[in-house]
Amino acid sequence: MVPTNYYLILSAILFGLGIVAFVFKRNIITLFMAIELMLNAVNLAFVAFSQSLGKPDGEVFVLFVIVVAAAEAAVGLGIIILTARNRHSLNVERVNLLKL
Amino acid sequence: MTPPGTQDILRVLPELAWCSAGVLLMLLQPFVKNRQALTFISMLGAAAGTLVTFKAAFGEGFGGLVQFDIFSLFFHWLIGLVAFLVILASDSYLERENLDAAEFYALILFATAGMGVLASAQELLTAFIGLEMSSISSYILAGYRRDSIKSSESAVKYFLLGSFATAFFLYGIALVYGATGSTNLRTLATADPSSNLVRLGLSLILVGLGFKVAAAPFHVWTPDVYEGAPTPVTALFSAGPKAATFALLLRIFATVHAATDFWFWAFWILAALTMFVGNLGALVQSNIKRLLAYSSIAHAGYILVAMAAITTAKNSDSGLDPGAAYAAVLFYLLSYSLVSVGAFTIVSDLGGQGERYVNTDDFAGLGTRQPFAAAALSVFLLSLLGLPITAGFFGKLYIFTAAIKSKLIWLAILMAINSIIGAYYYLRIIVVMYMHEYKGNVPADAPASLSPTAAMVVIVAVLATLYLGLAPNHILGIVLDPNLILSGR
């Protein structure tokens, strides 16, 4: 059996990759994919912990995360399409009407 | 675990009422074209959710998933009131901007239900669901002016950064779950504060929630989203989700002792940074929505001072009673929510079609042109500044006292400095309104007066602000109720 730590390290790597992609990528769709990657890293961590603890709560939590992520994806893609239609671009650097 | 029964349903009655009202509105949407009828129905829905709290039963529901107590009762009232006022204020805005009313109100009610879940969450799973219910509705509301580039831009920023923060929140939950084998706050009460996994998990949870309350350095989305979103929606953002997230933070404080020990310095630094970022940022703003957004960051900073005071008081060897600090947070949230909704309502109504007149210069000479709006906005700004006879004075006073009692002298000094910085930009708007002349002629399409519905919201907010400022004892009696302070039992 694969030790739990391996899963956790993989999950941490995936989460880190998600953060890096979110910070450095410039396309809105890619940013969105980075967030999905982070959510799936969370799911992996939950399942791994659930397995090692021998409790089903973690797996239940994963189901909820998947459902919410799907709802979020539906809304998010809608918003992205709206922006693309208004701006004719998906580059975040050109989405700059509002100054920080 | 037993299947849910009537008792469980009674614990989520307000959320059920808000959700049903939202669904009802969406069903009515094809048949009812009258906007005012829809406004009326959704106001009834918002009020119903608040009023059924009288019928709701105290205690745990759904096997510990939710906990309905006086604490969540307070927040249900606060959130319901905010939703009610925001819906009333949106009526004239939707007419002016020619937007669909039914979905707008339904989304506000769904977001409100999410905040309600957040306020009574006793389990991190429920908290996550509540957070997402309110966030996903908020993303849509931020982009509700579909043709406006600013609005869609604010939606995209809110969505991306909001989901990013949610991922941190979830990873934090996963780590805490791994360390303790549970996500129930009652079980987490015994979590080992020295475990690194618990500490890392709690830090990540704090990052996720810090984003939602707009604490620096997680505040970057706030000014952009507040500026681009439709103004009534901004009013909702500045009051509802913030209050609900602070409710969750307070509940975690009350039960998870590992968090109180570990979070003290985190809150100290967050509070100091948030106050300075908010107040210094507001100094240079000319757009009044952005200015109020930075001011909302600053006020989150003041509340974080009280949170830091709670962490010290909760430490077992301090011998302090955290009750006063709890009461300070609740009182401040109530007074700030009312003032913020009132101020944004005025800005929304005076903005004119397409929200074109939202610069400080557009408010020049308002004192002679529209004495009522100018006077009301002055009351709100003075309350944000914390002047006596307004609600803001007692709010600041209680937080200040709580900080001094917990021996957070430096944080109290920083808070005083920040209040002085804040005075500059709040008073500047009042000076512009009463002492400056409008340059050139007032544009013909600038609104000549507040719409009746907005005026109603403003009157309610002004009266509430003065009431809390002149006679705070009644509300104070409620927030100082020892049952309200969660003991973690």
Image (cartoon, coloured by chain):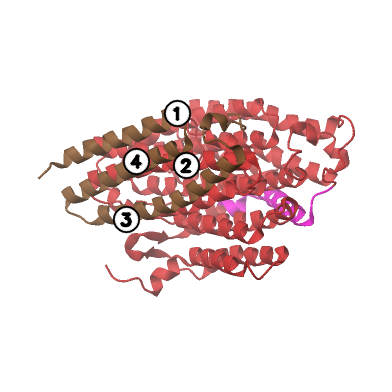
Give the residue pinned by disc 3: A63
Q: Are marks 1 and 3 on the same chain?
A: no
What's the chain of the residue with tag 3? A
Residue B86 to residue A24: above or below: below
Tell me whether the residue at label 2 lies in contact with that at label 4, contact meaning CB atoms closer than 8 angstroms: no
Q: Are marks 3 and 4 on the same chain?
A: yes
Q: How much space separates mark 3 and mark 4, taking CA atoms?
A: 16 Å
* Image spot of residue B10 (x, y percent): 44, 70
Find numbered disc 1 in the image and state the secondary structure of the residue it sits on: helix
The amino acid sitting under disc 3 is: Leu
Was residue B463 drawn as part of the magenta stretch in this picture?
yes
Q: How much space separates mark 2 and mark 4, taking CA atoms?
A: 15 Å
What's the chain of the residue with tag 2? B
Residue farthest toward the front in the current orientation of the protein: A88
Tell me whether the residue at label 1 lies in contact with that at label 2, contact meaning CB atoms closer than 8 angstroms: no
Query: What shade has chain A been given?
Result: brown
Q: Residue at x 39, y 34 (%)?
A: B264
Residue A69 to residue B433: above or below: below
Q: Residue B269, labelled with which disc?
A: 1
